Image (cartoon, rainbow, N blue to C red):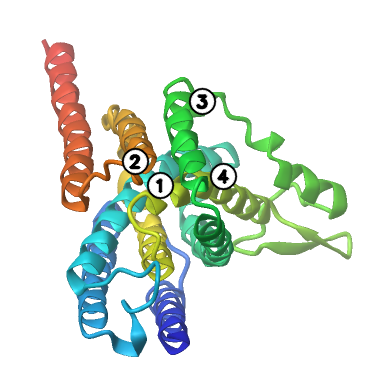
């Protein structure tokens, strides 16, 4: 089993190395067309891995599917990976809104944004691994924790209804304030560098502050998204791998949507309903569990409804302004 975990981590590191070291060696502005192509690539890789998950669990390679808290069949494992991936990817949309606000606030040129997101996602893999390990240990040791997670998700959904990104103040972020207290920070960017020299002293650049912001906000979003996937499955391998593939596609998703976020006005509302539904599913998990196939249909239906409603309202507004 450890060999499988090591193989997955090696796979992700190779994909990231190819991304930054081969395909994106030169800092450049990522176009919407390029972002859509990369989004398709990451989704395809995730689906191929989903097929591999089916084979691994169906044939019990390296004992997968034979231990407690693991999915017993390939069908169960593949379906729950897919559902978890969709949930995590959809919840990442809210992260896109915040990342766009951070880049705008600090006036980060478009050609340097990919570099920030690359290193941010690399750090997110480590942080999410730690949080998933802790969450798994808690749920396996204390069954009642599942109810705490469910209630927390419902609370978060309600809170999200009344929270606006425009009211956020990135300069008040705890990571940014701590960095400025313990380390010199330059007032200007120095290309794509995270550190530079000011009067002979090493100092962090605003690009490094933005990286800290992206990392710290991902931790906050993980507090919501990780309990959400525990409502789908408590298999640590599926929880972690679906999480990682979702955040791998976050960069391309950001560049594909960043310029048109205002056109998807109801997507954020869709996320509220997804969180609420997952919270209810978690609360019912020990009494009247909702079948995973039903969960998948409901979650996809909520997201499609939000997207279609956004497009229709945008077209209606365009007709009114044109008339």
In the rendered image, which residue does mark 1 sit on? Answer: 228
294 is higher (above) or lower (below) than 114: above
Q: Are marks 2 and 1 in contact (CB under 8 Å)?
A: yes
The quadrant of the picture occupied by the N terminus is: bottom left
Name the residue rendered at 20%, 49% in the picture.
291
In the rendered image, which residue does mark 4 sit on? Answer: 220
Q: Position of residue 152 (x, y in %)?
A: 50, 36
Q: Work out whether mark 3 precedes mark 1 in sequence or the reverse, and give the earlier one.
A: 3
Q: CA distance from mark 3 to mark 1?
A: 25 Å
Name the residue rendered at 23%, 39% in the picture.
303
Q: Is residue 39 visible?
A: no
* Quarter of the rendering containing residue 46: bottom left
Q: Position of residue 149 (x, y in %)?
A: 48, 42
In the rendered image, which residue does mark 2 sit on? Answer: 278
Depth check: 242 or 22 in front? 242
Secondary element at image label 4? helix
In the rendered image, which residue does mark 3 sit on? Answer: 166
């Amino acid at each position: 089993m450890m060999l499988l975990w090591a193989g997955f981590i090696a796979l992700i590191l190779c994909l990231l190395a190819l991304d930054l070291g081969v395909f994106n060696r030169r800092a450049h502005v990522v176009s919407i067309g390029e972002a859509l192509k990369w989004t398709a690539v990451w989704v395809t890789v995730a689906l191929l891995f989903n097929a591999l998950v089916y084979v691994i669990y169906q044939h019990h390679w390296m004992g997968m599917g034979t231990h407690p808290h693991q999915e017993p069949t390939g069908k169960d494992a593949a379906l729950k990976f897919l559902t978890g991936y969709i949930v995590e990817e959809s919840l990442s949309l809210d992260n896109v809104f915040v990342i766009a606000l951070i880049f705008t606030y600090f006036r980060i040129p478009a050609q340097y944004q990919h570099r920030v997101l690359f290193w941010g996602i690399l750090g997110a893999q480590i942080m999410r691994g730690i949080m998933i390990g802790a969450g798994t240990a808690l749920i396996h040791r204390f069954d009642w924790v599942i109810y705490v997670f469910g209630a927390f998700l419902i609370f978060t959904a309600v809170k999200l209804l009344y929270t606006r990104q425009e009211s956020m103040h990135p300069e008040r972020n705890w990571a940014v304030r701590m960095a400025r207290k313990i380390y010199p920070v330059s007032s200007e960017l120095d290309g794509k560098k995270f550190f530079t020299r000011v009067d002979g002293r090493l100092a962090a650049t605003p690009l490094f502050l933005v990286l800290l912001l992206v990392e710290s906000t991902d931790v906050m979003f993980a507090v919501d998204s990780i309990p959400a996937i525990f409502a789908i499955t408590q298999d640590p391998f599926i929880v972690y791998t679906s999480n990682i593939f979702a955040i791998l596609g976050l960069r391309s998703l950001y560049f594909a949507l960043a310029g048109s976020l205002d056109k998807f006005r109801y997507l954020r509302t869709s996320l509220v309903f997804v969180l609420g539904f997952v919270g209810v599913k978690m609360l019912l998990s020990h009494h009247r569990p909702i079948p995973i196939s039903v969960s998948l249909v409901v979650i996809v239906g909520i997201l499609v409804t939000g997207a279609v409603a956004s497009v229709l309202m945008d077209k209606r507004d365009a007709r009114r302004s044109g008339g």
